[in-house]
Amino acid sequence: MNGVLPINKPSGWTSFDVVAKIRNILKIKKIGHMGTLDPITTGVLLVTIGKSTKLFHLAPNHFKEYIAGFKFGLTTDTLDITGNILSNSKIMIDSTSLSVCLPKFYGEILQIVPSYSAVKINGKKLYERARKGEPTELPIRKVTIKQLELLNYNYQNQEGTLLIGCLTGTYVRALVSDIGRDLHCGATMTTLVRTKNYGINLDQTITIAEVEQLEKAKQLHKYLLCADYFFNDYAPIKLSQQNTLKFQNGVKLNILTQSAMGYVRVYGSDDTFLGLGIIDSQNILSVGKLLV
């Protein structure tokens, strides 16, 4: 079995918990995921199955969509509602002030990576350092916010929800915290749902319970997405029967037709997706990562 299962991750589970559960259900060792979700977060988690797992670190930077709940006046050490409270402000923010603030965070912005995150510094995860109270200089990254819309806001409760569209690497809880800092009141993320990832919507996902049911009924393959779908940004190359065997054996090939440089999707003579290739400036195709 090879491909991607679109899972609706439940609250309280880590991404690793989901992978471990599905590994146990399918009795397959090679299982991973595309895009870590914190335990508080629900929604689209793309679980990679079989040999296709080794391809996805090469996937293009894709659009992701979230619906995030937030509360003004409250800050925590984790930047979300699960953390220890650091401050509680009585400042009241009106919807007009919020609407003026949001455009500041649209486009390419700088974001400080949260101290409670899986990013590694000198081989050690930031959340491990944070739990031990180790002082750490947090890295700053450029992230891209393509969509930022206020869906609703309750002035009395100082709570609301945001629709956020962004590229890979964005921390939504850090974004919420930065908005609260800009308004001088503080803010924390209360809920988060990933509604889209790599073009897969929430209504296309299945639950872990459904994975168990479908596997027992031998129907799970109907929900398994082909690996090459996630590399549609790369141009396709189809090889002859002779070149298919050569490519699978790691032989570099001279591509006679003009092709785009960089990564390409490579298909065999029978249209089987072989994996990713790399075309250089001399139109030489070499293996990027084989699927088969």
Image (tube, helix red, strand yellow):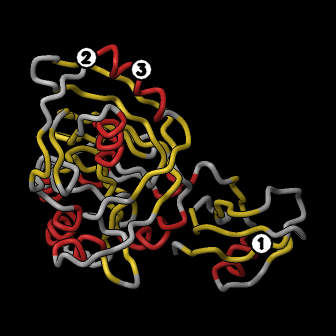
Label located before the other in sequence (2 or 1): 2
Q: Earlier in the sequence, mark 3 or mark 2?
A: 2
Contact, CB < 8 Å: mark 1 with mark 3?
Answer: no
Q: Position of residue 45 (x, y in %)?
A: 29, 52
Front-lying residue, 37 or 9: 37
Residue ID at (16%, 25%): 158
Query: Image quadrant of residue 148?
Result: top left
The answer to whether residue 146 is left or right of residue 249 is: left
The residue where tag 1 is placed is: 285
Identify the residue under disc 3: 100
Front residue of 160/40: it is 160
For the residue pair 115 and 223, the one nearer the viewer reads as 115
Q: CA distance from mark 1 to mark 3?
A: 51 Å
Going by the image, does 169 lie left or right of 91? Answer: right
Name above or below for residue 152 compared with residue 120.
Answer: above
Residue type at numbered disc 3: Val
Q: Tell me residue 98's x, y (percent).
A: 33, 22
Distance (Cα) linking label 2 and label 1: 58 Å
Query: Residue at image x 36%, y 51%?
Result: 171
- Pinpoint residue 100: horizontal percent, then vertical percent: 42, 20
Cβ atoms under marks 2 and 1 closer than 8 Å? no
As drawn, is 208 to the left or to the right of 29?
left
The quadrant of the picture occupied by the N terminus is bottom left
Report crowding for label 3: few under 14, some 14 to 19, many 20 or more residues within 10 A (C-alpha): few
Q: Amino acid at mark 1?
A: Leu
Residue to which mark 2 is pinned: 94
Disc 2 secondary structure class: loop
